[in-house]
Image (cartoon, grey):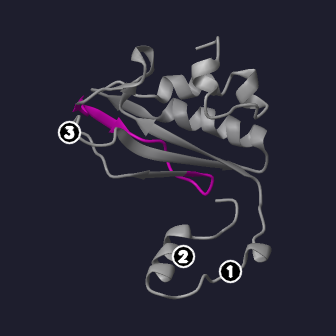
Amino acid sequence: MVTGTDLVLEQLRVAAGEPLSFTSQSIVHRGHAIEWRINAEDPERGFLPTPGRLTRWSPPRETPAVRVDTFVHAGQTVTPYYDSMLAKLIVKGDSRAEALERSAAALDAFVVEGVSTTIGFQRAMIEHRDFIEGRVHTRWIEESDDR
């Protein structure tokens, strides 16, 4: 969303033996994007998977700044046998602050019923000073006193 490059298309080209259609020097970054992985997990229980039936599934409306990549729908059963990811929510803004503001609105609009999800936890992250300022790392959630 920030480079205008379709990475999936590029992966398919490379798999077919074709070269990339760009060089790293030709990539121009515009704005800031955040990807939220919407998982059927319970943050209050150590992010354990929460299998069950999706009784309601209503992702936010897609716009040029909000994209939802998913395969699920209302009525579908989330099993314990596979990855718990239900969707990727990708949100873009001209700045990190705008991307966070749009993320908050998109997460607030995302409705999932029937299983616990990470949406509430992710929404709370947007309000955390470390996250706002980009001071997070791969162990930040485990090490944070604010969980």
Q: CA distance from mark 2 to mark 3?
A: 34 Å
- What x and y, as percent, mark residue 84? 34, 38
Mark in front: 2 vs 3? 2
Q: CA distance from mark 1 to mark 3?
A: 42 Å
Q: Which secondary structure dominates the residues rendered in magenta?
A: loop
- What x and y, as percent, mark residue 40? 35, 32
Magenta highlight on residue 25: no
Residue identifier under label 3: 75
Q: Could you tell me the amino acid type at mark 1?
A: Phe
Q: Residue at x 38, y 39 (%)?
A: 58
Q: Could you tell me the amino acid type at mark 2?
A: Glu
Note whether 25 is above or below 118 in the view shown: below
Q: Residue at x 54, y 76 (%)?
A: 10
Mark in front: 1 vs 3? 1
Q: Which mark is residue 10?
A: 2
Tell me where the magenta segment starts and ends, as one range: 52-66
N-terminal label among 2 and 1: 2
